[in-house]
């Protein structure tokens, strides 16, 4: 198994070789592919040897005196093992499951299939066996083996309905030509496919066998070969993308290729940040889910703000290609095309959805129906929540109009409702700004204004910008560490949007560490174990007296202890533990049942502190009696 340092070194070496000596790099890749094929041949011969040898032993000993003997049993065991392994190798799918999609036929979409036939012929590409329409803004060729590790790959075109709805017909042709370039018999296409097949073959085998003891035939080879081939294949993947771009220029046009490369990331980001969030907001007003795919891409040129789109392109152009990127950065792709970005979005009636022919209606209806069924529960829950929010919004506004001073939490909630219910950007900003001026050292005030500045375009006050929002979120985390996860996630997303990859990675690592800590805290507080340490509860006497009186009123309760669990990760808020035991006359044969009934009575009668666990001290939990009794002032009953 290669370490991270060894892997990165192998990637760097392969990248340098591909740039300085491309012919030698290609020969190296062919040698690695040949090595994989030779190892596959060795596996095949080994399996055939085991199968024929075990069959020969079984047939030879059949009918002999003392049959079946140990040799027959051994031969049968080997035959079963070899048969099991052969079945595994034949059924594996390259470590991947086939993508879900709606198949369409040539009769349904003759224009699309005629276009694919023409492009395949011009690109000298391998033929496609099937076209699947998916629900993503995506196009790609899926190549999965019919015979598992032995290959015979089936090629399917995956074509997203959102892509057809949002690109013009010419831009869609560019996408199809690019994807078919990966199936081209010329150039780097064949080498890239063979390397891809090897990765599918051996990663699929590793996933299929896992930690099974029968994988000793492959373990050491897989650990080295997958890592090394993967490291060496990154430059090839990027070179293949450049070659596919050049092919799309030759088969369609340079202008269309430039337009497609310019708008693809803009549309993808618009769908993610604009279309889908706006569509989900309709749940605020409508009790039933809408049909998202029928509504999509009717007039993208009017829906997408041109200035916003230019900023998206600028941010995309600022990114650079990393060593482990499978696709070149956008700026490198434009440099190879010797062109500059050119934004052309599909207007009304200009999208490529018509290529689906008679399949467009049924496919759209099926995807809408599946989306509605999948999202109906949260849609209904959000609709009800918004109706409740409208009532709260009206109550808070009435209190403010009456001269009441809201708490920081209530003021923040009102600002949130002003945006989510009232959709008033200016008033929301004013309320968040006023809240910050009022309570500059309150974490919620810093978080509210910081999150707004980082994620919204409306900032009428010249003295505030996105970087102020960045600083305010950092300040909120310093004031209260419970804001860490939310702030880190926002800062990571902001840095990613603006090409600040190193900062984004920093916040991603900090977010991961915080989530791990929160999970550890949750786990520690969710259970009480005999191995835990306990200390005096430290509650006020009046609170303890109230709990003691409530417990004494419960018939059958013999003992009760109140302690505080000693926590490793976070001591606030305190975690209290109430241990109880039932009277002896309740314990004959039904002790656990009576303890459960007692738990229900305690929960109903006792007003618990903010966080308290109630545990029975009967049966396997009897050890708690000794631990709790040693804690000073723990005994309540």
Image (tube, rainbow, N blue to C red):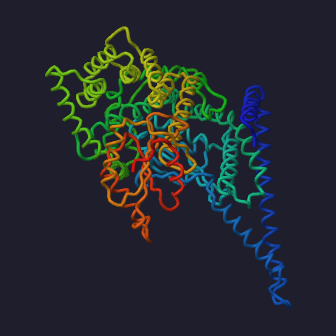
Q: Is residue 211 above or below residue 355?
A: below
> Toward the viewer: 289 or 579?
579
User: How far across and down, in percent of the image, does residue 593 sit?
Assistant: 40, 65
User: How far across and down, in percent of the image, does residue 581 sit?
Assistant: 43, 57
Q: Which residue lies most toward the top here?
A: 463
Q: Residue at x 31, y 43 (%)?
A: 546
The quadrant of the picture occupied by the N terminus is: top right
Image quadrant in which you'd find residue 541: top left
Report whether 145 appears left or right of 176: right
User: How far across and down, in percent of the image, does residue 115 sit?
Assistant: 48, 44
> Toward the viewer: 148 or 288?
288
Report whether 498 appears left or right of 3: left
Q: Residue at x 40, y 39 (%)?
A: 352
Report whether 599 appears left or right of 403: right
Residue 365 in view (yes/no): no
User: How far across and down, in percent of the image, does residue 150 sit?
Assistant: 70, 58
> Toward the viewer: 315 or 440?
440
Q: Residue at x 60, y 33 (%)?
A: 327
Q: Is residue 146 above or below residue 260?
A: below
Q: Residue at x 42, y 48 (%)?
A: 578
Image quadrant in which you'd find residue 5: top right
Q: Is residue 39 above or below residue 473?
A: below
Residue 557 in view (yes/no): yes
Report whether 602 appears left or right of 571: left
Total marks drawn?
0
Q: Which residue lies most toward the left here?
A: 402
> Toward the viewer: 355 or 309?
309
């Amino acid at each position: 198994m290669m370490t991270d340092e060894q892997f990165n070194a192998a990637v760097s070496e392969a990248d340098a070789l591909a740039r300085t000596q491309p012919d030698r790099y290609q020969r190296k890749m062919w040698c690695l592919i040949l090595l994989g094929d030779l190892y596959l041949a060795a596996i095949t011969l080994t399996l055939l040897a085991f199968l024929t040898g075990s069959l020969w032993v079984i047939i030879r000993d059949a009918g002999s005196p003392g049959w079946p003997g140990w040799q027959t049993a051994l031969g049968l065991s080997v035959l079963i093992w070899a048969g099991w392994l052969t079945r595994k190798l034949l059924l594996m799918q390259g470590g991947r499951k086939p993508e879900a999609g709606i198949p369409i036929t040539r009769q349904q979409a003759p224009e699309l299939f005629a276009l694919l036939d023409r492009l395949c012929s011009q690109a000298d590409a391998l033929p496609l066996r099937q076209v699947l329409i998916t629900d993503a803004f995506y196009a790609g060729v899926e190549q999965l083996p019919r015979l598992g590790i032995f290959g015979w790959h089936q090629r399917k075109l995956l074509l997203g309905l959102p892509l057809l709805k949002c690109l013009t017909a010419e831009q869609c042709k560019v996408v199809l030509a690019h994807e078919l370039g990966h199936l081209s018999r010329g150039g780097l296409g064949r080498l890239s496919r063979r390397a891809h097949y090897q990765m599918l073959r051996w990663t699929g085998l590793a996933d299929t066998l896992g930690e099974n003891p029968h994988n000793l035939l492959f373990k050491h080879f897989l650990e080295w070969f997958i890592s090394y081939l993967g490291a060496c294949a990154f430059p090839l993947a990027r070179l293949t993308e450049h070659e596919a771009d050049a092919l799309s220029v030759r088969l369609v046009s340079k202008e269309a290729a430039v337009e497609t490369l310019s708008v693809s990331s803009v549309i993808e980001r618009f769908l993610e940040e604009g279309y889908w969030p706006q569509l989900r907001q309709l749940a605020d007003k409508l009790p039933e889910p809408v049909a998202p795919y029928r509504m999509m891409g009717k007039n993208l040129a009017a829906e997408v703000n041109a200035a916003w789109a230019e900023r998206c392109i600028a941010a995309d152009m600022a990114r650079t290609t990393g060593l482990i990127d499978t696709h070149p950065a956008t700026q490198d792709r434009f440099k190879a095309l010797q062109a500059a970005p050119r934004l052309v979005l599909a207007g009304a009636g200009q999208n490529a959805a018509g290529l689906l022919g008679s399949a467009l209606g049924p496919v759209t209806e099926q995807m809408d129906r599946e989306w509605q069924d999948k999202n109906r529960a949260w849609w209904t829950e959000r609709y009800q929540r918004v109706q409740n929010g409208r009532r709260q919004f009206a109550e808070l506004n009435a209190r403010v109009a009456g001269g009441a001073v809201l708490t920081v939490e209530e003021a923040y909630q009102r600002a949130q409702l002003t945006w989510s219910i009232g959709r008033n950007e200016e008033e929301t900003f004013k309320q968040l700004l006023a809240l910050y001026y009022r309570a500059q050292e309150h974490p919620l005030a810093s978080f509210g204004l910081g999150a707004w500045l980082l994620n919204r375009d409306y900032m009428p006050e010249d003295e505030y910008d996105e970087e102020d929002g960045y600083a305010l979120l950092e300040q909120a985390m310093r004031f209260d560490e419970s804001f860490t996860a939310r702030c880190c996630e926002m800062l990571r997303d902001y840095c990613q949007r603006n090409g600040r990859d190193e900062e984004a990675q920093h916040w991603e690592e900090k977010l991961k560490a915080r989530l791990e800590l929160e999970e550890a805290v949750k786990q520690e507080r969710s259970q009480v174990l005999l191995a835990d340490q306990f200390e005096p509860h430290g509650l006020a006497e009046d609170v303890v007296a109230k709990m003691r009186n409530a417990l004494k009123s419960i018939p059958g309760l013999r003992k009760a202890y109140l302690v505080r669990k000693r926590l490793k990760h976070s001591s606030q808020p305190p975690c209290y533990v109430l241990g109880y035991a039932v009277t002896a006359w309740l314990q004959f044969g039904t002790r656990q049942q009576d303890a459960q009934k007692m738990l229900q009575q305690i929960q109903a009668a006792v007003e618990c502190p903010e966080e308290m666990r109630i545990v029975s001290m009967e049966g396997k939990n009897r050890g708690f009696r000794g631990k709790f009794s040693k804690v000073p002032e723990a005994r309540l009953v």
